[in-house]
């Protein structure tokens, strides 16, 4: 098990590797050191443990590099997803239209604007971006009001497990007429997937692939909208057809849970090294209350969810370092 000093050295190795190897850095500017100065490398080291991006492992990169993209063919592609290849979460997919998705956030904005006379609402602990743009944050389902419109991640962002009272939440929304958007971005990475009930209130389901494959800048996914669509949605559909085409190709060629199943061994390996337990969501582990890692959780410290993505990305180099130092 790593001590804190060795853990810190690993983060320095990760940061320096990101600096010299673009394939190992993230798509955003802050996801690698800004320069080779000690201050910039240290700044990156201090943030490496936060967030849960899609891993840039050889597994994901090999498949992405294998894709032959014919943009003209994709332009004419009629968006169609075989919903039999998507896990059964209790949704009757025949009630929904399949559309290309621009990205999750813009779909959320569109959904909220559609219900602009209602109060945008989320539960505390949901995706940090939702917490930035939505003021009305609640802790219990009894706080859902008839004039609300609810956005909720499934599984829930705070702990990457489906809320235990999800059926009661949806039942209340159905009885009050509260429209719901389900964000399923983490779904391809988890094992425990209960079937939901009382789905009449669910109007929009977003299914992005950008936490599964490193495509956060390209965007990739599908949005399911309850039928019937409006005239505007039929006439001028919004969305990124390239990202939707990649999503479709991925589930057809590799299967919805390919990355989840491929990373199980890496998850087990790095949880053992870090002295933590594997989480149901394959990209993270869980530390106990006495672990020094609590200060390095995916948020801002004093949590128990630890991102394994940096260790997945730099597995080979970190393994050599630990072997050389008999760790």
Image (cartoon, grey):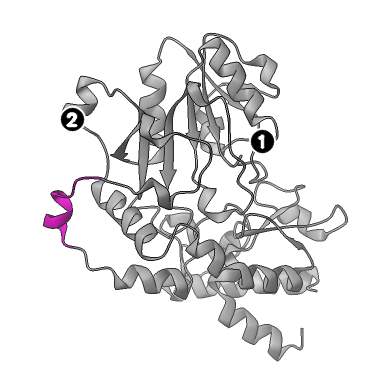
For mark 1, does the 10 Å Cα neighbourhood hold few (<14), some (14 to 19), or many (20 or more) residues?
some
| Percent position of residue 49, x then y | 63, 58
The answer to whether residue 228 is left or right of residue 49 is: left
Q: Which residues are magenta?
A: 70-79
Give me the residue at 64% from left, 30% from top. 166
Residue 216 visible within the image: yes
Q: Secondary structure at mark 2?
A: loop
Residue 176 versus residue 134 in the image, above or below: above
Q: Image quadrant of residue 127?
A: top right
How many residues crowd around disc 2 within 10 Å: few (fewer than 14), some, or many (20 or more)? few
Q: In front: 178, or 17?
A: 178
Label annotation for residue 265? none
Residue ID for mark 2: 236
Q: Residue under circle 1?
A: 163
Q: CA distance from mark 2 to mark 1?
A: 35 Å
Q: Quadrant of the C terminus?
A: bottom right
Q: Is 268 displayed left or right of 3 in the figure?
A: left
Q: Quadrant of the N terminus?
A: bottom right
Rendered view: 272 above or below 170: below
In this view, the residue in front, 15 or 164, is: 164
Q: Position of residue 237 (x, y in %)?
A: 22, 33
Name which of mark 2 and mark 1 comes first in the sequence. 1
**In which quadrant of the rendered view does residue 263 lie?**
bottom right
């Amino acid at each position: 098990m790593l001590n804190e000093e060795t853990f810190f050295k690993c983060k320095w190795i990760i940061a320096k590797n990101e600096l010299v190897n673009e394939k190992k850095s993230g798509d955003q500017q802050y996801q690698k050191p800004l320069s080779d100065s000690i201050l910039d490398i240290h700044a990156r080291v201090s943030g490496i443990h936060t967030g849960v991006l899609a891993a840039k492992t050889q597994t994901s990169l090999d498949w992405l590099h294998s894709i032959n993209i014919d943009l003209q063919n994709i332009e004419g592609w009629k968006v169609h997803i075989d919903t039999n290849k998507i896990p059964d979460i209790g949704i009757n997919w025949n009630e929904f239209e399949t559309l290309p998705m621009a990205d999750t956030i813009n779909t959320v904005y569109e959904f909220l604007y559609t219900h602009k006379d209602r109060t945008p609402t989320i539960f505390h602990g949901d995706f940090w971006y939702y917490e930035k743009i939505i003021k009305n944050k609640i802790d219990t389902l009894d706080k859902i009001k008839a004039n609300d419109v609810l956005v909720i991640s499934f599984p829930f962002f705070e702990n990457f497990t489906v809320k235990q009272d999800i059926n009661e939440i949806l039942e209340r929304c159905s009885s009050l007429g509260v429209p719901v958007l389900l964000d399923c971005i983490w779904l391809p990475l988890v094992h425990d997937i209960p079937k939901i009930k009382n789905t009449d209130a669910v109007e929009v389901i977003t299914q992005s692939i950008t936490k599964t494959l490193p495509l956060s800048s390209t965007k990739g996914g599908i949005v399911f909208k309850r039928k019937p669509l409006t005239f505007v949605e039929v006439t001028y559909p919004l969305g990124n057809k390239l990202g939707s085409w990649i999503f479709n190709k991925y589930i057809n060629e590799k299967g919805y849970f390919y990355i989840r199943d491929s990373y199980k061994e890496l998850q087990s390996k790095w949880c053992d090294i870090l002295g933590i337990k594997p989480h149901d969501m394959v990209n993270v582990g869980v530390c106990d209350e006495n672990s020094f890692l609590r200060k390095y959780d995916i948020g801002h410290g004093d949590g128990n969810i630890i991102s394994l993505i940096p260790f997945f990305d730099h597995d080979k180099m970190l393994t050599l370092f630990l072997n050389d130092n008999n760790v």
